[in-house]
Amino acid sequence: MRFRRDHLRENRCEQANLCLSAITIQVLAVLFVATFIRSALGFGEALVAVPLLALVMPVQVVAPLAVLVSITVALVVVIQDWRSVHLRSAGWLILATLFGIPLGLWMLKTVPESIVKAILGVFIIAFAVYSLAGRKPELHSDRLAPFFGFVAGILGGAYGMNGPPLVVYGVLRRWTPIQFRATLQGYFLVASMVGMAGYALTGLWTRTVTRYFLLSLPLALIAIFLGTVLHRRLSSARFLVFVNVGLALIGLLLLKQALHA
């Protein structure tokens, strides 16, 4: 009811060209921060944007809105850094994801979400701590890319969390910061477009979603630019630290969600 009241008030304000509602300001602020994080590190915006936006908007609006913003970030980064996309890795990850999504949809109906999030959270935290402690796990080829892509598809199909396995894979492959960001965006661009097609087919891509997206677009482009500036100033060592800290925070968030499920 609160969302509907604010939404109606916002429409009246817009007609008079007088104001933006509190909800719109919150949405724009959250999307700006989330887009900046995504542009700087290459991941993490969904776990920032979706929970916060869901506090003030219906999830049916939040999910497709977040995917549209994801497509925007990925498209801009791929255009900027397409030469740095590790095409072989991205191809294997995307292909394997398509096979993992059906299993994820099955898990959504049969496996308790809290169990999956708890296991994933513990694994991610352990990996991040291991890496931050100075250990150097490394993969020298794309032999395991289908495995990580398949797991990403499962988690994406079930809970919209396909990012963590991809980030772990990028860390293990020891990509340079620009390869890391560009390759993940190549993956997210394709995956997000497929997801948006699904929202369109199911009627969830509404005028409200498009309207919020268009309002957020100027700030999102600024956030992408600022995130890119920060990204290019980070050394490989510092970037790896930021990525592992980000992974640890994601793991803690997943554990918190599991405990409160």
Image (cartoon, helix red, strand yellow):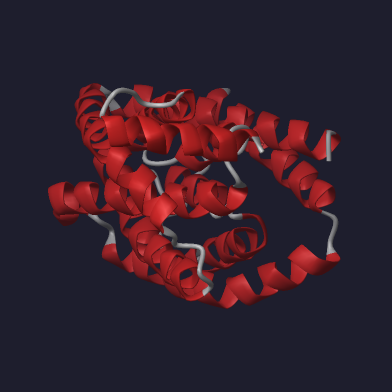
Q: 141 or 236: which is nearer to us?
A: 236
Seen in the picture, residue 223 relative to 11 is either above or below; the reply is: above
| Image quadrant containing the N terminus | top right
220 with respect to 43 (left or right): left
- Residue at 22% from the left image edge and 32% from the top image edge: 228
Q: Position of residue 192 (x, y in %)?
A: 41, 60
Q: Is residue 162 above or below residue 154?
A: above
Of residues 87 and 38, the one drawn nearer to the viewer in this rendering: 38
Q: Quarter of the image containing the C terminus?
A: top right
Residue 260: percent from left, percent from top: 83, 34
x and y percent of residue 75 in the render? 24, 54
Residue 93 visible from this viewpoint:
yes
Left or right side of 139 for 225: left
Please name whichever residue, 68 or 152, is drawn nearer the observer in this view of the structure: 68
Residue 51 shows in this picture: no
- At a point 49% along the width and 52% down the height, the residue shown is 166
Q: Quadrant of residue 159?
A: bottom right
235, above or below 189, in the image? above
Left or right: residue 251 compared with residue 172: right
* Residue beneath the point at 55% across and 55% down: 162
Q: Quadrant of residue 110?
A: bottom right
Q: Position of residue 17 (x, y in %)?
A: 26, 29
- Residue 11: quadrant of the picture: top left
> Number of numbered discs present?
0
Report the side of 87 relative to 98 (left or right).
Answer: left
Q: Nearer the viewer, residue 116 or 138?
A: 116
Q: Residue at x 75, y 46 (%)?
A: 117
